[in-house]
Image (cartoon, rainbow, N blue to C red):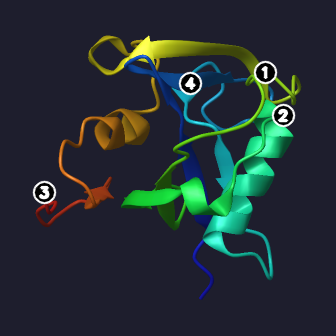
Amino acid sequence: MNIPTGVHILLEREGRVLLQRRAGTGFFDGQYSLPGGHVEEGESLFQTVIREAREELAIDLAAESLTLIGAVHRRSDTHRIDFFVDAGAWRGEPCIAEPDKCDRLAWFALEALPDETVPYIRSALGQARRPWIIEFGWSSGASPA
């Protein structure tokens, strides 16, 4: 069984987190999410983070500045694993580099996320302790803190 594996990139500036509004993908369109994407064949998590940052935001990340901060095992159309990585530092100014997948990019305070934030992203951003793991969307069982 193949479990789709994704990465989400946390960029923070002046107490705010960068979110993008999804558009044209058929997956959570109109909702805000962290930048990121799926791990491709032969690619490590951090290689995926670096590639996705370049593709989606036109910024460069260095592997040594990346920190794994948590994971979400979620039930969706199937079950998925999403890893959350703090970018630490980057080169360049984030911009919408894939306008066919994103129609807005903005910085938000964690306590003032837009109502239209993807639910599991909102849950992940609410975690105070690092590293963390969340089980999201399963019908039974407790979620570890």
The residues tagged by marks 1 and 3 sit, at their Cα atoms, a distance apart of 34 Å
Does the image show residue 38?
Answer: no
Image marks 3 and 2: residues in contact by CB distance under 8 Å:
no
Q: Position of residue 82 (x, y in %)?
A: 50, 60
Question: Residue 91: which quarter of the image?
Answer: top right
**The N terminus is located in which quarter?**
bottom right
Q: Are marks 1 and 2 in contact (CB under 8 Å)?
A: yes
Residue 28 to residue 112: above or below:
below
> Tag 3: Cα neighbours inside 10 Å, few (<14), some, or many (≥20)?
few
Of badges 1 and 3, the one in the foreground is 1
Identity of the amino acid at label 4? Leu
Cα separation, mark 3 vs mark 2, equals 34 Å
Q: Where does label 3 land, which residue? A: 145
Which quarter of the picture shows residue 24?
A: top right
| N-term-proximal mark, 1 vs 2 | 2
Disc 1 secondary structure class: loop
Query: Of label 3 and label 2, which has the lower sequence position?
Result: 2
- Crowding at dot 2, Cα within 10 Å, few <14 / some 14-19 / many 20+, comes out as some
* Residue type pointed to by label 3: Ala
Between tags 4 and 2, which lies in front? 2
Does residue 100 appear in the picture of this structure? yes
- The answer to whether marks 1 and 4 mark residues whose Cβ atoms lie closer than 8 Å is no
Residue of label 4: 19
User: Which amino acid, by three-letter code, is at mark 2?
Assistant: Ala
Toward the viewer: 89 or 94? 89
Mark 1 — residue? 95
